[in-house]
Image (cartoon, helix red, strand yellow):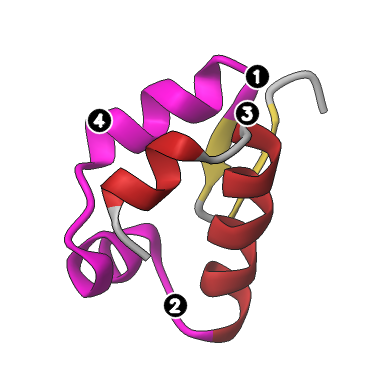
Amino acid sequence: MDRTQLERMDIHMVLSIVNEKLRIECDSLDALLARYELDGGWLAARMAMIGYRYDSHSNQFRSAGK
């Protein structure tokens, strides 16, 4: 999983993949960013485009409206 691949995917697929990686492989957003060499600002901006933000308590991106 790299940024180039993620940029070509539907944003909802990116959300699904990122949340799965957070659930199974990474115990924090920082761990995910380091493991896959992703830019946190870029990922946060992409998720914000569909109304999602990172919730550290649940370790996943969740709808900002919930």
**Which residue is denoted by mark 1 in the rendering?**
50
Query: Does 24 appear above or below 30?
Result: below
- The tag on residue 66 is none
Q: How far apart are marks 3 and 2 (CA)?
A: 19 Å
Amino acid type, residue under disc 3 in the picture: Tyr
Amino acid type, residue under disc 1 in the picture: Ile
User: Which residue is at 37% across, 37% downward?
Assistant: 43
The N terminus sits in image quarter:
bottom left
Tell whether 54 sits left or right of 62.
left
**Which residue is denoted by mark 4 in the rendering?**
41
Task: Give the residues drawn in magenta, as a range.
Answer: 25-52
**Which residue is denoted by mark 3 in the rendering?**
52
Amino acid type, residue under disc 2 in the picture: Asp
| Dot in front, 2 or 1 | 1
Whether residue 59 is visible, yes or no, is: no
Q: Distance between the residues labelled 2 and 1?
A: 23 Å
Query: Does 31 appear above or below 16?
Result: below
Q: Residue 37 appears in which quarter of the rendering? A: bottom left
User: Which residue is at 65% across, 19% downward?
Assistant: 50
Residue 41 magenta: yes
Q: Distance between the residues labelled 3 and 4?
A: 13 Å
- The tag on residue 27 is 2
Q: Residue 10 appears in which quarter of the rendering? A: top right
- Describe the element under mark 4 as helix, strand or loop: helix
Q: Residue 23 appears in which quarter of the rendering? A: bottom right
